[in-house]
Amino acid sequence: MINFSLIETMRYEPGQGIVRLNLHMARLGNSTRKLGFAGFDQARSGLEATVASLAETCRIRLELFRDGRCEIVTSPFAPLPEDTVWAVGVAKSAHLSSSEPLLRHKTSERQAYEQARSEYSRQECDEVLLLNEKDEICEGTITNVFVDAGGGKLLTPALSSGCLAGVLRTSLICAKKATVERITPDMLERYPFYLGNSLRGLIRGTLLTRR
């Protein structure tokens, strides 16, 4: 029995609309087809009606349930300053499985991510990364990971590692600004790296001393 929902978290900009809307809808549509959810067309119509009344930069959270019910919540959003640097930890006890197909979809099934986040206080770090069973970096609790190893493109874990098909990640790969590669924790010590999602964009990271 499916007891989770599908989620899209997006940014609305006045005069521009929802940033990367087509990629968000492509991901949601793919998930509804593969996981047997109803209501994609109604969700998109509800989203269009919601943004018609927006007049400021907003965070939009769309949640679609298997029976087609859809909830859309908006809230004011202030983008992070361009020079923001996040302190980043690596989870020790929480892991992802590279063989779990549900990880390719953005859902409300977030136990592993919540466990990882609980390993560090909010005062210690801004984001926590999860490893898979091969000790490869998969993703953060709310972001994908991008490493600048100096080859002209950012490196990001493949979906086969167990990471989410993030919308920002997809857009960077399609624009040939990123390519998939196996990412290990030591690479985050040797090279500059970033965290990112479609709501916040790319954020420079700095790795905490591993415990």
Image: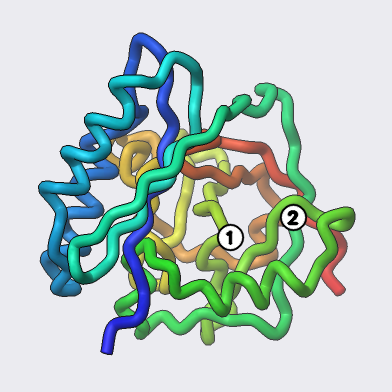
The amino acid type, in three-letter code, at marker 2 is: Val
Residue 158 place in picture, x, y as percent: 37, 63
- Number of marks in the image? 2
Q: Secondary structure at mark 2?
A: strand
Q: Which residue is mark 1?
A: 140
- The foreground one among 174 and 124 is 124
Residue 88 is marked as: 2
Q: Give the residue drawn at x 17%, y 68%.
A: 37
- The foreground one among 67 and 176 is 67
The image shows residue 132, relative to residue 196, as above or below, that is: below
Instruction: Using a 10 Å C-alpha cutoff, classify the residue at mark 2 as few (fewer than 14 neighbours), some (14 to 19) or many (20 or more).
Output: many
The image shows residue 93, relative to residue 159, as above or below, that is: below
The amino acid type, in three-letter code, at marker 1 is: Gly
Q: Give the residue drawn at x 64%, y 81%.
A: 94
Real-space Cα separation, disc 2 to disc 1, in angstroms: 9 Å
Q: Quadrant of the N terminus?
A: bottom left
Residue 72 place in picture, x, y as percent: 37, 45
- The foreground one among 128 and 180 is 128
Q: Give the residue drawn at x 29%, y 59%.
A: 64
Q: Quadrant of the C terminus?
A: bottom right
Q: Secondary structure at mark 1?
A: strand
Outermost residue, top side? 15
In the drawing, does residue 113 fall left or right of residue 38? right
